[in-house]
Image (tube, rainbow, N blue to C red):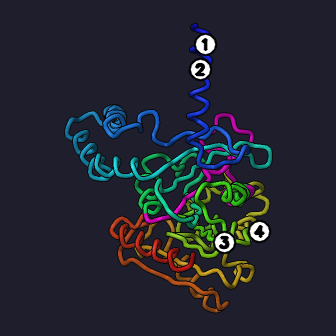
Amino acid sequence: MKKYLLILSLAVSSFSLQASNLINDERIKEQQSCFRWIFTDYDSWRAGMEKKYKKRFKSEKKLLRAMSGFDSSFGREKFNFYKNTLSCNIFKYLVDGNMVNGYVIKPKSTTKKLPVLIYNRGGNGNFGGVVFGSMMRNLFPVASEGFIIIGSQYRGTFIKNSPVQDEFGGRDVDDVTELLKYIPSIEGADPLRVGMYGASRGGMQTFLALKQAKNVKAIATIAGNSDLLKGLTYRPEMEKVFRKRIPDYEQNKEAELEKRSVLKWIGELPANVPILLLHGTHDKRVSVKHSIDLADALSKNNIPHKLVLYPDDNHGLRQNKEKARKELVSWFKEYL
């Protein structure tokens, strides 16, 4: 009897896992809901964050301030809304023989096929990886507007003892373009309406992927970089990242940075893919000059684009987050 119950339990678990798959492709592995573990409900998540903050902050006042900020940024009502209206899975997929982590987010209820956005994260390695909090803050609101979002964490991110690492715009670009193969297997996705956008380093990643992706209809960048060598004059400490991430950097510095700088090969961009550039004028991480210079070059090459600057705002567009989101959503609704 016990053996029968165990078999039945395993069968039910297997069925449940299969039923929750958002990408129906056998090459996609280990699909799991984002709303699991401490993210099952808001109280569990909040308790987990409070435990984490208690280790960081020794004073009760700082702890209360941190928890107040957490509730202000997220909140139970918002959490429940997204959990009830969105499906979200993390998964693994194979690129160049190596497992890479990815994620997909989609509205639960829809009567028609939806456009798909490939999102390219910023940062490098585990820093800037897309965790649940960043999904809820940056991606869930966009998906709620009627988009399916799929993205890569880039090779080596959140994988112990990975034989490959993020190359900051090197072979990790393949981790982005590989996702295009799986879009037709996402239930409810329209593979003929695909857009792409990225934030910070993700802007660079977006342009690099666009050179290879022939079916992307529109793109957008948020605080993206366009000339990495020139960017070192604005933020010289980025050279530490380049040395760590970019293969053969010391021997071929200029060549490697040019490969990753859209301003150096703007003529290779498709002339029929409109580009939205969003940037804060007080960005201390990626100078606004990156977007201004790129907009000038796009004009000279007759590539359709729109530049939106947010006066005195920072790298994360903290003062204009909602305005920037509306701009982004409006852009993709117009062109997809």
- Residue found at x 56% / y 39%: 32
User: Is residue 151 one of those drawn in magenta?
Assistant: yes
On residue 4, the disc is 1
| Most frequent secondary structure within the magenta stretch | loop
* The disc label shown at residue 216, or none: 3
Farthest-out residue, top = 1
Q: Give the magenta range.
A: 145-171
CA–CA distance between discs 3 and 4? 27 Å
Q: CA distance from mark 1 to mark 2?
A: 6 Å
Are discs 1 and 4 less than 8 Å apart at CB?
no
Q: Residues within 10 Å of mark 1 (few under 14, many from 20)?
A: few
Q: Give the residue number, with chain letter if any, for mark 4.
A: 255
**Element at badge 3?**
strand
In this view of the protein, which residue sits in the foreground, 272 or 67? 272
Pick whichever of labels 3 and 2 is earlier in the sequence: 2
Q: Is residue 293 left or right of residue 25?
A: left
In the rendering, at what x and y percent does residue 320 appear? 35, 70
